[in-house]
Each structure stands twice: as structure tokens, then as C-alpha cells.
Image (spheres, grey):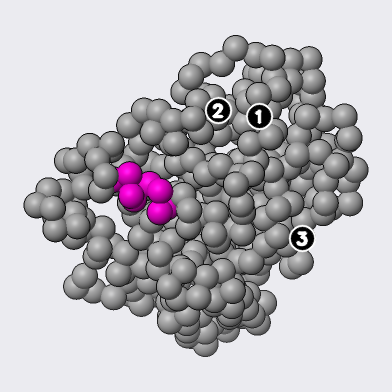
Amino acid sequence: MSKKVHNFSAGPAILPAEVIKEAAQGALDFNNIGMSILEISHRSKDFIDVMEEARSLVKELMGFGSEYQVLFLGGGASMQFAMVPANLLVTGGTAAYVNTGVWASKAIKEAKGIGNINVIASSEDKKFSYVPKGYTIPTDANYLHITSNNTIYGTQQHQFDKSPIPVVCDMSSDIFSRRMDFSKFDLIYAGAQKNMGAAGATMVVVKESILGKTGRKMFSMLDYQVHIKGESMYNTPPVFSIYVSLLTLKWLKKNGGLAWIEKINDEKAKLMYDEIDRNSLFTGTCAKEDRSKMNACFLLKKPELEETFNKMWKDAGVSGIKGHRDVGGYRASMYNALTIDSVKALVDTMKEFEKKYADSKVTA
Ligand SMILES: *Cc1c(COP(=O)(O)O)cnc(C)c1O
């Protein structure tokens, strides 16, 4: 790569440079077999090894044994919005959902097409700027659905209570970013393209014992049990995305796993939020205790300086901090592969911007 870019993209997002390099090599000549990973059978030994290693690394990082199954499916995390209720919502039963933003809302909308949905808590009253807490989980619901990190609004759940019913969690944008007691969850899903790999695959980790209770006839492709039986190869899986995920998981493990990445992510988030709070030209958009360590959202207090700030960060090599169209302002996504140096580059730009323009006449 010719020019130093600080890639704050919200997704698809930054991957470790060495992972990109190895993936590119695999696209040229995989394992020195004289063929690209893009042109071999998914049932070849070479690819089955990729799939098996990826599945077992996921289990290892989560500390799971044989009661959990790991799948890599197509369809994106959005497909899980339908697959979850299709597989877990018993005919005539109810599922409990917590609404914490755009993705949770989409999950709710989809589930309502399958059965009764009870939205037990929501932060919509304050534009999803916090994570609801202290709600009671109904014991008669089939499952509880939560979103651990709200990519668009920049909030993150930092504490997870024990639940009397199975917990399903959309971890698309903070998967493997921190240590967790994963045993509190019965089903975890995450699109690969934010913290794990290339777009295409979605990881699903499910406790097998919660499946097979709906009494509903299922389409094979939507049935977790079919995919489990097929060892995630019921149909042709998104091979390249899974390969990139494997390389990222290996990178994570080699460097020290979740404890290692958590420390780095904590440092990056502290650096970023300290500057947002200190700088007189910016303000954060979320409740401090619920701020996301992955996606920091902030606003410029003098909108008339927007063009000026935009030019400054672009000149500094910063990329991808324009906020989501629903929120406006800025969003710095600091996924696992983003280095502290990149956060420093953005923070330094914000400091310089303040120095130059904080006292400029407001003309708006
Ligand atoms: C990006 C994202 C999704 C949607 O992912 P797709 O793979 O595009 O379907 C769902 N949930 C969360 C939390 C996300 O960040």
C-alpha cells in the first residue's frame, strides 16, 4: 500500500495488514497447491481444513465445548434477523427483544413476520443514545434478543445479566473485541465484515440444545440443524470470507487473544473519548457509561466549520469518519485491526483544528 491511510470505516472495515497480505497470497496460490483458494472445491481437504480450524478457533476464543456449534453461513447478519425467530420462536410463543437502534429494529421487524414479539425495553425515546438497563426478562418468552454493540448510534452493552431464558446476541460489530463470559449467551451471531474478515460470511455460534422446538416446518437453508448436520457445508459456503476470518482469528490468537485486544481497544477508546470530551469544538452523542469502544460518535459544535475540519482530517490521511446518515456528525470506528497510531492521528488533527479555529468568529 502506497499511502498511509488511517481507516476508520464502519464496515466493511479495516483488517490486519498481514491478514490482507496472506489472503492475497491465498488468492494467487493457496498452500502452494498451484491453485487459488477461489478455484478449489469447498469439499477439498485444503478447504475443509480451513473451515475446521476456523470453527475450532471460534470455540477456543469463546471457551466453548461440544455443547455449542459454530457455523459460517451466507446472507449477512441481516439473514439472522429471520433465521433466529424461524429456529427459536415456538408456534404460538413469544420472543422478547430489546430495541437499541437500527439493527435491533430491523431484527424486531423481521421477527414480527414470524410470531409474537414483545419489545421489553427500548432507547428510542432518546434517539438510541443509551442502552436500556434494569428491565425484567419475561420468564415465559422463548428467548431474549439483544445487540451488544450498536454500530450506528455508538452505544455498547458493557454488562450482561444472567437470564432465565435463552439469550441471543447480535455481536456483529464488537465480536472478539473484549473478554466476555460467553456462556451467558445461547446464540451469538456476527457478520464477518466488521471485526473478523471479509464480507460474505456470518458466524453463528449456537447451543445445540435450544434448537428443534418450534414445531414449524423449515426451509433447509434457514434451518440451523441442517447446517450443523452439514458441518457448515450444506451448500457452498462463502469460502474466501471464511478464509479471511480464519486468518484474522489466527492473528488474534497469535498476539495474545481477547485479553490482548481488549487492552488495546480500551486504550484506543480512552484516547478518543478523552479528546471528544476535552475539545471545545466537539461533543459526544451518547451516555458516557454506554459509549461504544468500537464506534465513537461525535458532533461538531460549530457546523459552519465542517468543510474546514473535513479537509483537515482528509489531509491527515484519516478515512471513513463521516457519521451514518441517520445520526450525522462523525463516527470513528476503532475495530480490532485499527492501531493506536491511527487514533492518535485523528486526535492530533482534532487538537490542531481546535487550536486554529476555536476562537474563530461564529458567523452562522
Ligand atoms: C452491520 C450490522 C448488521 C448487518 O450486517 P449485514 O452483514 O450487512 O447483514 C447487523 N447488526 C449489526 C450490529 C451490525 O453492525
Q: Residues within 10 Å of mark 2 (few under 14, many from 20)?
A: some
Disc with the residue nearer the chain's start (2 vs 1) = 1
Which residue corresponds to mark 3?
Answer: 159
* Gap between marks 2 and 3 measured at Cα: 30 Å
Which of the image's four quarters has the C terminus? Answer: bottom right
Q: Nearer the viewer, residue 153 or 93?
A: 93
Give the main secondary structure, helix, strand or loop, of the magenta stretch: helix
Q: Nearer the viewer, residue 309 or 343?
A: 343
Outermost residue toward the left in this view? 34
- The answer as to whether callout 3 falls within 8 Å of ligand 1 is no
Which residue corresponds to mark 2?
Answer: 225
State the SS at label 3. loop
Quadrant in the picture for residue 137: top right
Which residue corresponds to mark 1?
Answer: 211
Q: Is residue 277 magenta?
A: no
* Gap between marks 1 and 3 measured at Cα: 26 Å
Q: Residue at x 18, y 54 (%)?
A: 30
Amino acid at the residue labelled 2: Gln
Outermost residue toward the top in this view? 217
Disc with the residue nearer the chain's start (2 vs 3) = 3
Task: Tell me: residue 74, above or below residue 194.
Answer: above
Magenta part of the chain: 47-54
Quadrant in the picture for residue 361: bottom right
Cβ atoms at labels 2 and 1 below 8 Å apart: yes
